[in-house]
Image (cartoon, rainbow, N blue to C red):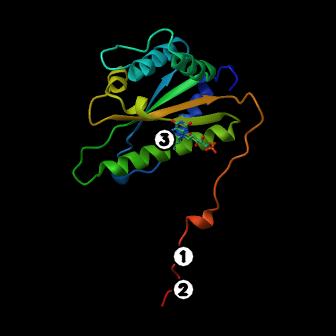
Amino acid sequence: MKPDPIDRETLERLFEAANWAPSHGLTEPWRFIVFQGNAKKQLAEAICSTMADEGQDTLPGDDPRRAKIALKTDTAPVVVAIVCQPSTKPNIVEMEEIESTAMAVQNLHLACRALDLAGFWSSGKKAFHPKMASFLELEAPARCLGFFYIGYPANEWPIGQRRPYQEKVIWREHRS
Ligand SMILES: Cc1cc2nc3c(=O)[nH]c(=O)nc-3n(C[C@H](O)[C@H](O)[C@H](O)COP(=O)(O)O)c2cc1C
């Protein structure tokens, strides 16, 4: 991604699109924490602390994983923590709330593409680590589902790759 900043109005458009995701009972469980500028450095440090060995607070200064994390968080001008704040209503299942939050992210991603912005969802252990929940000031049952990196692409759009949909669809209309 290019380091070019993304203006606030454009970011607001992205979140407006995200906000139109569906949810069971209109619970609207998606939440976003937007990291820009120096706040991204704090996020990078929080990620480093999730990778530390037991007994360590954070990764040692010379650990090569630090450079990788710094590169990712420095390159994207905006990094968004994706949070699901599930409803506690008895008729709502947590799975539905996670699905709904993922749909909000898909909306966000499609809106990025429409505005010539690149987006990338990353998660893994760092996102689900209790240290990350604490850094993001999340209280259970809220949980982080990952990070969405946004920026103007520095290169040509990559060619997407997917196996054929035919492998994933079962048709049952002609069964007797
Ligand atoms: C929930 C979720 C988590 C993901 N986590 C990672 C990740 O931690 N690291 C990674 O390289 N790709 C991750 N991906 C995959 C990328 O976001 C992306 O989909 C993949 O690189 C293919 O690129 P494309 O979707 O633009 O074709 C994740 C995707 C999803 C939906």
Residue identified by numbered label 2: 174
* Residue 31 image point, x, y percent: 41, 34
> Taking 104 as reference, is 111 left or right?
right
Q: Amino acid at mark 2?
A: His
Q: From the viewer's perspective, is residue 4 above or below residue 16?
A: above
Within-10-Å neighbours for mark 3: few <14, some 14–19, many 20+: some
Cα distance, mark 2 to mark 3?
39 Å
The reply to whether discs 2 and 1 touch (Cβ–Cβ < 8 Å) is yes
Residue 72 coordinates in the image, percent (x, y): 58, 23
Q: Which mark is residue 33?
A: none
Question: Could you say whether the residue bearing mark 3 is in a helix, strand or loop?
Answer: loop
Most extreme residue toward the right, as rendered? 156
Who is closer to the viewer here, 27 or 126?
126
Q: Position of residue 63 (x, y in %)?
A: 50, 14
User: Which residue is at the far left?
Assistant: 90
Q: Can residue 20 be seen in this snapshot?
A: no
Residue that mark 1 sits on = 171
| Residue 19: image tag | 3
The answer to whether the residue bearing label 1 lies less than 8 angstroms from the nearest atom of ligand 1 is no
| Residue 9 showing in the rendered view | yes
* Number of residue marks: 3
- The quadrant holding residue 125 is top left
Kind of residue indicated by mark 1? Trp
- For this rendering, which residue is in front, 4 or 70? 70
